[in-house]
Image (tube, rainbow, N blue to C red):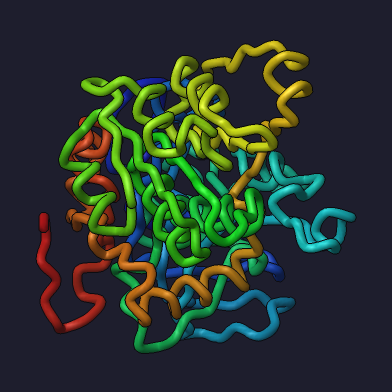
Amino acid sequence: MKVKAAVINGVNEKYRFEELTLGELYPDEVLVKVVATGMCHSDEALRIGDAEYPMPAVFGHEGAGIIEKVGSAVKDFAVGDQIVMAYNYCGICPSCRTGHPSSCNDWTPLNFGNPRSDGTHTFYKKDGTPVSNFFTQSSFSTYTITNAMNIIKVDPEADLRLVGPLGCGLLTGFGTVVNGLKPEIASSIAIFGTGAVGLGALMTAKIEGCSQIIAIDIHDSRLEMAKELGATHTINSRTENLRERIDEITGAVGVNYTIDTTGISSVMKSSLDILAIGGSTAPLAVTPNSLEFNPFTELTITSRNVLGILMGDAIPQLAIPELIQFHKEGKFPFEKLVKFYKFDEINEASQDSNSGKTIKPILIVDENYREDDLLMGG
């Protein structure tokens, strides 16, 4: 089967549309017609080489679409089902069986470009060159093959043009708060970086009952959005003294919980430095940068914690329906973060995301999905 895909052929190259061939559908897989897909910072990090990845590759891991074909071993899904795609996991290792699939023993080989266990791929170029998959999903394509473990069925009335980002960025922000940090009611939290992950965490902190929700960024427009979504305080760390403002807000006690989404070494260090005694920080960014600290003076004496939390430690099949319900109730208004682009505008969308012009770009891959109009570019 021939598909149109946005391919990255080398580090720091632009997306280039190519006709690829889909490989064979395996028994535990489904064929998906992609309707829309979010663009995530992780796609960009791999494109520019912040983490090594086998090229050529088709990225995209916030896809939503409609099942076109079902493998013989797949249960509980049928042709025509609307689905959101997340990450793959084995389902049988100790982590998976205790409710932590993002800590799956095989998480990296299943999600980061490796071929299937028999050496075959899901995408090939015209000359037979294999093209790496991402998250067993690769949603920057008109059609894709994904594993049954990746998919979450959503209501037939759900608008697939909106819900794709629930599969990664927003899931990560939500899960980091609910499953990772687990803030007590009336506790304080500071979030560094107000992109999709940070604002997803912020909205969740409000749902969880945090009394002080501090958004920290260098863009006033982003901070205004943070206020609209529930921030009780905002700090522009470019124009304000971070330490003084935190002392002012917390009575010099510090913050109970912090999240860093920037991946900048000095910012990650700040997220640790402003913690209260017994506080916890979660650095989330895909970054080549390091966080340096003295574990005795900065952790042990103050009983602080640095937590590694991948994909929000969330079970997508449970968390994504919950997020959709929160959205229906007006508690998780993530539609305020998005801007829609045509699939052919992927390089523009990537540039707008990098510049901060757009918080969450969503590519409309199938413009014929529904008859009702969707405001493109707005």
Residue under the point 28% across and 42% down: 17
> Which image quarter is the N terminus in?
bottom left
Residue under the point 26% across and 30% down: 236
Q: How many numbered dots are placed on residues in this image? A: 0
- Residue 167 is at least partly visible in this image: no
Spot occupied by residue 141 in the image (x, y as percentages of width and height): 37, 54
Residue under the point 48% across and 74% down: 83
Query: Compared to 300, does 328 lie above or below?
Result: below
Q: Nearer the viewer, residue 230 or 325?
A: 230
Spot occupied by residue 86 in the image (x, y as percentages of width and height): 54, 59
Q: Nearer the viewer, residue 189 or 64?
A: 189
Residue under the point 33% across and 42% down: 194
Q: Nearer the viewer, residue 173 or 56?
A: 173
Q: Nearer the viewer, residue 122 or 245?
A: 245
In the current view of this chain or complex, which residue is farthest to the right?
94
Spot occupied by residue 239 in the image (x, y as percentages of width and height): 21, 21
> Which image quarter is the C terminus in?
bottom left
- Residue 144 is at least partly visible in this image: yes
Spot occupied by residue 327 in the image (x, y as percentages of width and height): 37, 74
* Quadrant in the picture for residue 18: top left
Q: Is residue 313 left or right of residue 151?
A: right
Q: Is residue 248 left or right of residue 146?
A: left
In the current view of this chain or complex, which residue is farthest to the front?
251
